[in-house]
Image (cartoon, rainbow, N blue to C red):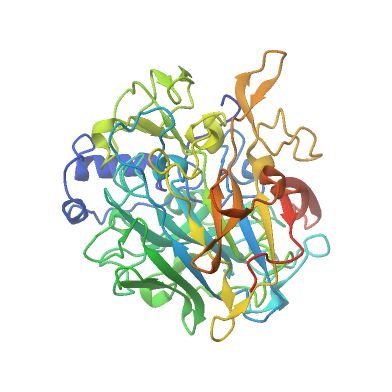
Amino acid sequence: MRFGSRSMMSIAFSLVTLTAVVAGLLGMGALHGSTSSARAATASTAHVHMDCGGGAVTCTEVWDSEKVFGEGKYIGHDEPSNLFYSDVPGSGNRMRYQLTLPRDPSPSAPLTPGKSFNFELHPAFWFGMAMCDTQSYPELVKTCTPDSDKNIVDPAISPKHPGVAFMEMQFYPPGWVFFPQSGGISCDPTKWCAALNIDSLSQNPVTGQSLNPTCAAKTGVEYVNFAFITLSGKPQPGSPPNPVDSTANTFTPNPKADLFMNSGDKLAVTMHDTQHGLQIVIDDQTTRQSGSMTSSAANGFGQVKFAPTTTTCQNIPYDFHPMYSTSSEKTRVTWAAHSYNIAFSDEIGHFDLCTTISGPGGNCTGLEGIKNDQEPADADDVVCQPASASLRVQVTGCVNPAAVSQGFDGTPYQNLWPDGNTKLRPTPILFSSPLTGKGYNVQYSRSAFETDLPRIENPAVCDRFTGVGCQLIPTTDDPAPGGGFQPAVFYPFFSIASKNGRCLWQEGNHIPGSKNDFGQNAQYGTLLNLTYTTTGGGPTTRYNDFRGILSKNPCRA
């Protein structure tokens, strides 16, 4: 897409720093065929961070990226989401999901028309939660009481909202380029891995101040604490999660230390607060392995001290606790484009095929797109890797960090989503509604669907101030015969199905056995006008999302 787009990393580093570090350490042209263990052994203690302003696929979408990062540095995270609401105390900080990891078709003949793989559809999917962070979006309140609905403050009424971060418990698909490499989104040829991400925003909307440029160059204005889920519950040695101290090793998966999971494995994903921070536990009920991570100072998690007027860059060791007690329309991350707290979200829109590239990590110089729907590449077809760099599925492709830079015509916007044809397409992600309560046996009462398409669509087409032109099916950059632009071929939607007596959510196309698809794309509802805080403390509004709220949770027992 040719409108003010920007490039973000494949899973998340400053591309300039990462490319220099990883090219020397891993040999960017010679990854195929070597083992994950061998690559992990080459990790470095050189500083590397997730650069959400210049290179991170998996960062939280901010409410106004132009305001945060400047004009021309456009972020585009397309995130169709499933939200869960409950007034039960603890529903905002204690829950358990059942999850079945999707399978891929055979890697042979990967360019067969109609064939797709998980890494082409989504570089990650995740479960989310709002977190206390007194240095993130620090408005006028210097404290945050964990696990409390006292933190609910409507920006339309007051700018006195405690500092807030957003946790994304992310899962990464196998089969593409190795994770730390430019364009890499996989930990292993066949196995999934997972990481706890906590995104913070070092900007004060009331004063208009941001983190000083010296520190921002080291950590990013939107910064991320990152840690793989490990078998020991501790980060790998020399792998501090906080962005001040993080290294290349922080982002290098290690099969001897991290929890690796097979496609098709059934998991229990438990999230609950502890004395020293949110703990994630993943129990693989298929392999009987378990992994965990606690967002504690002892594990190396930390805040970046909000210092707008100096050149200092200080890590503050910090236990990250959940922000809210419950989960409702009012429990928001007040700087994020999305409206939610407890949710499942898919990260789509980043992958596209390419016939010829300039080199590993370079640009597409040939034709982009799936067979029979190809067109000349443009300046936004970037962060590309040759088929020889892939761990398993031999295709040449680009993981353009800005979803919209694919013009909404990349692989995720084609009719290639799960539909029951497992010879050509993946099986769907299957996940239960979360259960809360002391024994993880209390259902959430309501659910909703949300997509942040207005936030990432072409502003010449979709006006976020008025909502005029914003569509549930995004507009591509392909001219329409009668003028304007063509709509995307496809956009995924959620449905429910019964599996072994359990009601489960799934995402994709028409999947055999689905009990309800909630109107397909109509499930995302109507335009949502959210209120944010602007300079001086006054409110402003944006249409960043479509949201459709169900009157009840259809998977409630």
Residue 97 pos. (x, y %)? 51, 69
Residue 405 pos. (x, y %)? 53, 31
Q: Quadrant of residue 362?
A: top left
Residue 525 pos. (x, y %)? 75, 48
- Residue at (68%, 80%) from the top-left corner? 88
Residue 55 pos. (x, y %)? 45, 42
Number of residue marks = 0
Q: Is any atom of residue 312 visible in this view?
A: no
Q: Quadrant of the C terminus?
A: bottom right
98 sits to left or right of 492: left
Determine whether 412 is above or below 99 in the image: above
Q: Quadrant of the N terminus?
A: top right
217 sits to left or right of 343: left
Q: Quadrant of residue 394?
A: top left
Q: Is any atom of residue 179 visible in this view?
A: yes
Q: Nearer the viewer, residue 494 or 208?
A: 494
- Residue at (83%, 64%) from the top-left corner? 157
- Residue at (43%, 51%) from the top-left corner? 50
